């Protein structure tokens, strides 16, 4: 396997694991459509490339066929929007996953429910780029925020006018009382 060029978008995981092969590379953020759509880089900044490495492994168990494992490591800089100040900021994102592959979806579902390991069904050709993108999206912060940031330059519903009684605006919309 070492002599031939391996295509990470059509990866034979079983062969990679059987031979204990490692691959590495990088993808431009623009090659990962869903990942790129999540980014809000600061003015003049561009989404960073995703650096990745993967290693196949077979784990032997007594009286059972070898288990197929794939170790995925991906690293990049994400550009979320801070939910406190609504400004973009950069944040390093690292994914480090060990994935076990089994023969069928049903087997994967049954094992995944009872295991702390991620279990996937083995496919003839795995698109590693899609898998890495999925894992990065799962690692995206639920509520992105700076470690510390200034108070927002705005307030929800603030039109720049001095703060007044909120009911005064509603009173002005009320029709005049009849016969008064």
Image: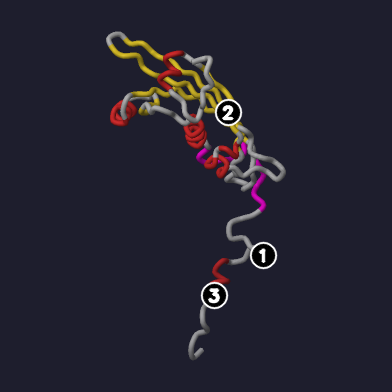
The rendered magenta stretch, by its main secondary structure, is classed as loop
Q: Which residue is mark 3?
A: 171
Any mark on residue 161, and which? Answer: 1
Is residue 142 a member of the stretch shown in magenta?
A: yes
Of callouts 2 and 1, the N-terminal one: 2
Find the magenta span and give its range. 141-153
Taking the spot 55% from the left edge, 27% from the top edge, the residue there is 74
Task: Give SS at disc 1.
Answer: loop
Of callouts 1 and 3, the N-terminal one: 1
Disc 1 crowd rating (10 Å Cα; few below 14, some 14-19, many 20+) is few
Residue 42 coordinates in the image, percent (x, y) = 68, 43
Any mark on residue 122, and which? Answer: none
Mark nearer the viewer, 2 or 1: 2
In this view, the residue in front, 103 or 175, is 103
Any mark on residue 75, and which? Answer: 2
Q: Is residue 34 left or right of residue 59?
A: right
């Amino acid at each position: 396997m070492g002599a031939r060029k391996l295509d990470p978008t059509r990866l034979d995981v079983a062969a990679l694991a059987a031979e204990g092969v490692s691959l590495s590379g990088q993808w431009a953020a623009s090659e990962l459509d869903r990942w790129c759509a999540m980014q809000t880089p600061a003015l003049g900044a561009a989404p960073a490339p995703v650096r990745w490495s993967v290693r196949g492994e077979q784990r032997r168990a007594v009286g059972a066929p070898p288990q197929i494992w794939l170790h995925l490591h991906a690293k990049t800089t994400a550009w979320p929007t801070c939910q406190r100040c609504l400004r973009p900021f950069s944040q390093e994102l690292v994914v480090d996953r060990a994935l076990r592959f089994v023969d069928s979806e049903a087997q994967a579902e049954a094992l995944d429910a009872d295991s702390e390991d991620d279990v996937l069904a083995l496919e003839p050709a795995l698109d590693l780029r899609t898998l890495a993108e999925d894992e990065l999206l799962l690692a995206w912060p639920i509520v992105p925020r700076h470690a510390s940031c200034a108070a927002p330059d705005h307030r929800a519903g603030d039109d720049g006018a001095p703060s007044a009684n909120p009911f005064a605006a509603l009173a002005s919309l009320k029709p005049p009382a009849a016969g008064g």
